[in-house]
Amino acid sequence: MAILVAVPALAAGQVSVQGGLLVGRAEHRVVDAGTLVAASGTLFGGALAVTMGERFQIHGEALGGPLTSAATPSLEDHDVAEAQISGGMKVRPWLILESGLSFRSFSNSLARQHWTTWRIGAETRVPLGFENVTAVLRGYWIPLVSVSGLSSPDVGLAAGVGVDWRGRRLDISARYTLERYDFAPSNGAQRLEELSTFRVRVGMWWPRTGRAKHSA
């Protein structure tokens, strides 16, 4: 249905494209049987967004990098790689409904673990009183999670907060995001897993526009 509604925007040429570069810091935390294992590192990647008219956007991004533990190098050090695609529909000037898929892998020299998730949620945008500067709040429920080698978690949630500055062509944003997954207890022990990221994105719009855009 969203595609059918967006077709008139495509026909009228009301389409703009944004390409951007991402750099961020991530921390991966796993609590299993009461033991905390944490690793962090710097991530690099890119993003692409297509906006159709004033209401619809498709957004994709990919990024990755090495994560190392605070202790001496060990098998807990691993690489993370992620790709995601999402669609958004603006239902109010300040409210955007979103849904998307994420594909993530954690790997070291011995094994690779794959995650596939589907999320639904919303984004709220609040002007901060400065020209073209907006605060962003996000919340997602993650009802479908597939993890290789593990049963699916009982609970999957994500939340984010950030700030955007938008010019006629240049777009700069900063985001902090936290994902949390609670697995069912097994043999009296429960596994909890979190991934937090802080990302900065610099993007360029084509064609140049004076309208405020929504980009993930």
Image (spheres, rainbow, N blue to C red):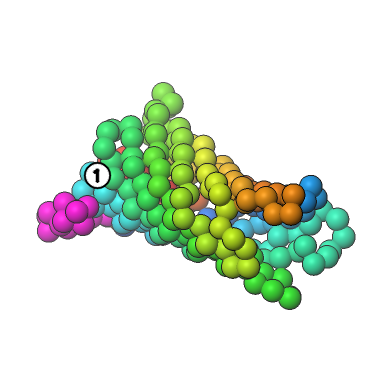
Magenta-tinted stretch: 1-16
Q: Position of residue 18 (x, y in %)?
A: 36, 56
Badge 1, how many Cα within 10 Å: few under 14, some, many 20+? some
* Front in this rendered view, residue 142 or 11: 142
Regarding residue 100, the answer to whether it shows in the image is: yes
Q: Secondary structure at mark 1?
A: loop
* Front in this rendered view, residue 79 or 112: 112
Question: Quarter of the image holding residue 59?
Answer: bottom left
Work out which quarter of the rendered image holds the N terminus and state it. bottom left
Which residue is situated farthest in the top direction here? 129
Q: What secondary structure is the magenta-colored segment mainly?
A: helix
What residue do we see at 77% from left, 51% from top?
Answer: 33
Which residue is situated farthest in the front direction here? 187
Looking at the image, residue 170 lies above or below residue 19: above
Looking at the image, residue 119 lies above or below residue 90: below
- On the picture, is 192 further left or further right than 34? left
- For label 1, the residue is 55
Which residue is situated farthest in the right direction here? 72
What residue do we see at 84% from left, 64% from top?
Answer: 73
- On the picture, is 77 further left or further right than 176? right
Tally the numbered discs. 1
Residue 40 covered by magenta stretch = no
What residue do we see at 40% from left, 47% from top?
Answer: 120
Q: Position of residue 142 (x, y in %)?
A: 47, 49
What residue do we see at 51% from left, 57% from top?
Answer: 145
Q: Position of residue 36 (x, y in %)?
A: 78, 49
Amino acid type for the residue under numbered disc 1: Arg
* Front in this rendered view, residue 116 or 80: 116
Q: Position of residue 204 (x, y in %)?
A: 39, 54
